[in-house]
Image (cartoon, rainbow, N blue to C red):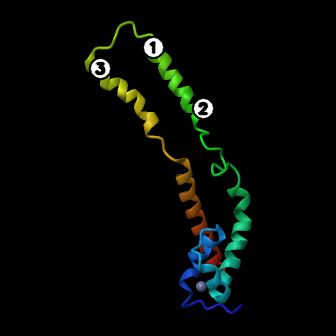
Amino acid sequence: MNRRDTNLCEHAESTVLLYLFGEAPPGYAAHLDACLDCQAALTEHADTIAWVSPALSQPAPITAPRGWWLAPTLALAAGLALTLQPAPQPLPATSQPAAAELDAPDLTWEDPLAADLQELDKDLDALARDVESSR
Ligand SMILES: [Zn+2]
């Protein structure tokens, strides 16, 4: 291989990963055609991705239908409604904040996709380092 270990192309460590996931900037494909560093990095990362892709495609919240969380959320809301319904008397005005606190967990829903993507980024970085250090 014609690879320089010093003065590596700046795109060989970052943009090439975006390219593998179809997220590279529009002009990068032309750069890739001419850049040996990026071509070498592409080959390395493609091997890595092929190696880890079975693990990446397992639970796949990425392909989960939009609104998958709706059923559990509705069930929780129904449970709350049933819990709150048999109140024997109207709540005094001073206890309204307590009712608002019961609704709060639904509003602080955390995006599981973002967490998964962060973890994926870390895993890819670690794998890239492993591949680099084994050469
Ligand atoms: Zn390059």
In the image, taking residue 31 as reference, residue 84 lies left or right, namely: left
User: In this figure, which residue is indicated by the disc labeled 2?
Assistant: 71
Which numbered disc covers residue 95?
Answer: 3
Q: Which residue type does callout 1 highlight?
A: Gln
| Mark before the other along the chain sequence, 3 or 1 | 1
Residue visible at 55% across and 28% down in the picture: 74
Residue 133 in percent (x, y) is at: 62, 78
Q: Quadrant of residue 92?
A: top left
Residue 5 in percent (x, y) is at: 59, 89
Mark 3 burial class by Cα count in 10 Å: few <14, some 14-19, many 20+: few
Label 2: state its secondary structure. helix
Residue 125 sits above or below residue 43 on the image = above
* Residue at the outermost top position: 88
Label 1: state its secondary structure. loop
Residue visible at 48% across and 19% down in the picture: 81
- Spatial separation of the CA atoms under disc 2 and disc 3: 29 Å
Q: Which residue type does callout 2 highlight?
A: Ala
Residue visible at 60% across and 32% down in the picture: 71
